[in-house]
Amino acid sequence: METLVQQFFNVDIILKSLPLVLQGLKTTLLICLIVVPMGLLGGILVAVASLSKSKVVRRSLAGFVDLLRALPPLVLLILIYSGLPFLGLRLSPLAAVTIAFFLNNAAYYGEIVRAGIESVPAGQWEAARSTGLRADQTFIWVVLPQGLRNVLPDLISNTVEVVKLTSLASVVSLQEMLYSADMARSLTFNTSPLVLAAAIYFIMLWPIVRLVSKLEHSAAR
């Protein structure tokens, strides 16, 4: 038991590695602050485009979204970071991570937002138009807010997945929290820094997970 505690819950090593792990946490939060708003905005644009009257636009977009959803985020990240240099475009690790995660999450957010928009009754469109609002005003001020509210649990749940996704950034040597914890592990030959990183992830995400659960139960009622 003592060996287990020393290997996974060594307080001295946790305290020594804490500054390095917190430095990585800053990068993790930075990625989230960039990817989540961009992904949501991209998702809204994807959802709007998917409602186009043009079959060519709808089918082309559906194929692109399906490709991004089917392609593992890690594969997409490696393709962007390691593949683009062969075309003469070399990105920094942060830029590659941001672009890869943006593309992946715009596809997921787009499908969620589209489902939300389609859940709004047609009567809402007609009622808003009858008040004198133009089609674009009706969509922005009436339909979109209701659609986002209807899929709010799914949007928040996908945002949680974005935070988890940041751990993949370590593959391209971006010093986010997992990368920092693993550096501390390699220096101390002890697993406690990884346990520390896991605990920080849990502290950040557990309240959000509980919020999603409450929203889902409220929606069900």
Image (cartoon, rainbow, N blue to C red):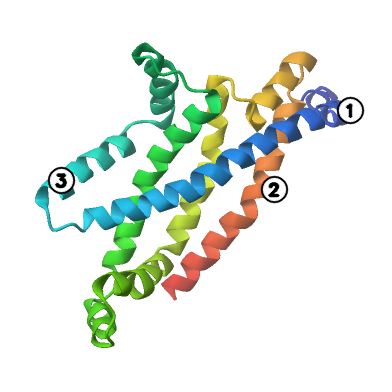
Indicate whether 129 appears above or below 93.
Answer: below
Residue 214 pos. (x, y %): 54, 66
For the point 69% across and 25% down, the residue is 180
Q: Are marks 1 and 3 in contact (CB under 8 Å)?
A: no
Question: Circle 2 sits in a helix, a strand or a loop, which is it?
Answer: helix
Query: Which corner quadrant of the image does residue 48 belong to?
Result: bottom left
Q: Is residue 9 visible?
A: no
| Residue 203: image tag | 2
Q: CA distance from mark 2 to mark 3?
A: 41 Å
Amino acid type assigned to the residue bearing label 1 in the image: Asp
Indicate whether 57 appears above or below 186.
Answer: below
Question: Circle 3 sits in a helix, a strand or a loop, which is it?
Answer: helix
Residue denoted by label 1: 12
Label 2: how many Cα within 10 Å (few below 14, some 14–19, many 20+): few
Q: CA distance from mark 2 to mark 1?
A: 21 Å
In the drawing, does residue 171 fall left or right of residue 147?
Answer: right
Residue denoted by label 3: 59
Residue 66 pos. (x, y %): 26, 40
Furthest-right residue in this view: 12
Residue 188 pos. (x, y %): 79, 16
Chain-order first, disc 2 or disc 3: 3
Query: Which is in the foreground here, disc 1 or disc 3?
Result: 3
Amino acid type assigned to the residue bearing label 3 in the image: Arg
Amino acid type assigned to the residue bearing label 2 in the image: Ile
Query: Which is in the foreground here, disc 2 or disc 3?
Result: 3
Nearer to the camera, 150 or 4: 150
